[in-house]
Amino acid sequence: MRFTSEQRLDDGVIERRFTLDEIPGILWTPACAPAQVPLILLGHPPLGLRKMYPRLVARAQRSAADGFATATIELPGSGDRARWPAVDQARADLRRVMEAGEPVGDEIVDALVLPLVDKAVPEWQAALDALLSQPGIGGPVGYSGGVISIGIRLAVVEPRVSAAVLFAGSLVPRAIFQEARQVTIPLHVLMQWDDEGNDRQAALDLFDAFGTKEKSLHAHLGGHAGVPQSAGDAAAQFLTRHLK
Amino acid sequence: MRFTSEQRLDDGVIERRFTLDEIPGILWTPACAPAQVPLILLGHPPLGLRKMYPRLVARAQRSAADGFATATIELPGSGDRARWPAVDQARADLRRVMEAGEPVGDEIVDALVLPLVDKAVPEWQAALDALLSQPGIGGPVGYSGGVISIGIRLAVVEPRVSAAVLFAGSLVPRAIFQEARQVTIPLHVLMQWDDEGNDRQAALDLFDAFGTKEKSLHAHLGGHAGVPQSAGDAAAQFLTRHLK
């Protein structure tokens, strides 16, 4: 892990850019922190860190105020990383099918999501190794947001992740749906009731499938991007309850 | 409205019992309050105030700490009020059907719930008249919990109620389901995912039907009585956002 820049944001939060095996990432730490702070991994959709930065830094600053370090890394095939033709093709297929108003077949979802999960999850685990070896950053670790299939796989395979906020989506491969049954950590699941990109019943079925004994679903009226401020507050309180 | 007793609870909250046209009720006010505090009407199932008291006083004390007055009245046919043979009969019919594992027909739900709503809602409105004329109690008014059909009717017909926390249930008459479409105030709907007394799909359909532009559904794993502490906190924060 190599730090490439460091700056102090308005509220004193330290933002450090890094690369890890050529994967770009960002680490945010609170201005005034005790010796060790817990860590939240900030998931995001595969649109590139540059595009996602405004939303990510807002979540990081909120989390820092709650006493958390936060970190994120670029997803494979996104942002400044090498293009990934197979996934680009699957995304083009998805767009074509959705614009035509046709049902999204399993093969498109599998082709789009499974390679991403298979490649991204070990990268997030490697990032976790590196981040937890930094002075001042300790456990426990939470995961929040982003591609829900990555969150599910990470919750199952990574024992250092002890609570997760997931954003319910319907583009979940059947294989990942089965993995959801194996999740045992506390989950706080956000859902937009009229999400134009996600099927409501599929999202409810996924919530039902999670194997954990502690899960809650928070559905708000509105489309995909309409998550209210209060939902972010509630998710932050969930992480504080479970990680502090 | 005639006050019949007054006591100061451990945390300084003032608890006053009253009767209003022979209906017993309780008013709780914060120990240290500004000139005017907003009011939350505490709904409850028709099990009698005496039986519900421990849960009601806990909600009242929590609300007082948030700066609210709270009040509740006995439901018709419950507690120390005159028995109501028709509703008792409907309740017995419901129990028999549920114990037999048979589907609960519309006619049982209508017979059980509609008379209760028709009689209770004007009583809660009369209580609101009396409570808001007390010194120190102002608007805005919230409604929280209890029989969801009463909450729905009150939200539709009583303009002084400006936000409501409802507990999703499935024993909702079709007529009330239609009224739900007319609700325009912000709603925070709680639901237990494995509620043994309520049908999940019916509860989701009801949430979908609410006509308001601001509604959220908070579903927690567990049975009817398993609402976690954090869900109460979130509901309290919702009322604080909308009433203060």
Image: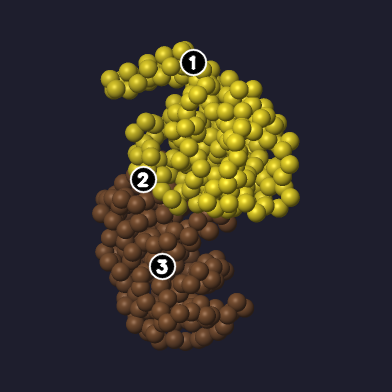
Chain colours: A yellow, B brown
Residue at the image position 62 percent from the left and 51 percent from the top: A31
Would you name the residue on which mark 1 appears? A84
Dot 3, crowdedness within 10 Å: few (<14), some or many (≥20)? few
Q: Which residue is mark 2?
A: A221
- Tag 3 near tag 1, CB within 8 Å: no
Q: Which residue is mark 3?
A: B244
Q: Quadrant of residue A165?
A: top right
Kindly indicate whether the residues beneath marks 1 and 2 are on one polypeptide chain: yes
Q: CA distance from mark 2 to mark 3?
A: 22 Å
Left or right, B104 with reference to A81:
left
Image quarter where the C terminus of chain B lies is bottom left
Q: CA distance from mark 3 to mark 1?
A: 51 Å
Q: Nearer the viewer, mark 1 or mark 2?
A: 1
**Numbered disc 3: what chain?**
B
Question: Is residue B91 something that shows in the picture?
Answer: no
Q: Residue at x 64, y 42 (%)?
A: A39
Q: Are marks 3 and 1 on the same chain?
A: no
Quick check: A133 left or right of A14? right
List x then y, in percent, for residue A63.
Answer: 57, 48
- Percent coordinates x, y for residue A184 in the rendering: 64, 36
